[in-house]
Image (cartoon, rainbow, N blue to C red):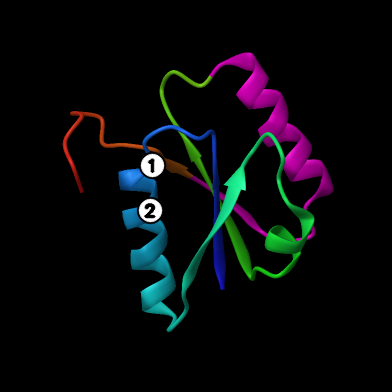
Amino acid sequence: MLTLVHGGGAVTAALAWAEALASAFGGVVRDGGSTETCPRDAVNGASLVAVAVSAETDHVTGRRAASLLRNCDRPVLFVPARRADGGHP
């Protein structure tokens, strides 16, 4: 299972990345909620955690991601929240 955590904004591209990766291994994607709350049960139930980030990621989001890296017992993959050209996946 791949868990996608995000900042709460548009994550269409991140979801597409996560679904493509999960399907390659016969897995599924679960929404893990916000990087602000980072529910431990969602993270600990995952084989991989994908974190949606954008070019506008601020220092608060960066601190949350750093905390996730320190406290998460799972591999963490950072994926773009949306395409650079603003389009859909």
48 or 28: nearer the viewer: 28
Give residue 28's position: percent from left, percent from top: 46, 74
Q: Nearer the viewer, residue 15 or 34?
A: 34
On the image, the x and y values in percent for residue 46 come to 65, 68
On screen, residue 65 versus residue 31, left or right, reads right
SS class, disc 2: helix
Can residue 64 be found in the magenta stretch?
yes
Q: Residue 50, position in %: x, y? A: 54, 52
Nearest the eye: 4 or 24:
4
For residue 15, which numbered disc appears in the image? Answer: 2
Taking depth in this image into account, of 44 and 25 the one nearest to the observer is 44
Location of residue 51 in the rendering, given as x and y in whole percent from the top left corner = 55, 45
Residue 20, compared with residue 77, is above or below; it is below
Contact flag, marks 2 and 1 (Cβ < 8 Å) = yes
User: What is the crowding at mark 2: few (fewer than 14 residues within 10 Å), some, or many (at least 20)?
Assistant: many
Q: Which residues are magenta?
A: 58-78
**Which residue is painted at 70% across and 59% down in the image?**
43
Residue 66 included in the magenta stretch of the image: yes
Quarter assignment of residue 18: bottom left
Looking at this view, name the residue that lies furthest to the right.
Answer: 71
Q: Looking at the picture, which amino acid does disc 2 mark?
A: Leu
Q: Amino acid at mark 1?
A: Val
Disc 1 secondary structure class: loop
- Mark 2–mark 1 Cα distance, whole angstroms, equals 6 Å
Q: Which residue is mark 1?
A: 11
Which residue shows up at 77% across the image and 52% down it? 72
The residue positioned 36% from the left and 36% from the top of the image is 10
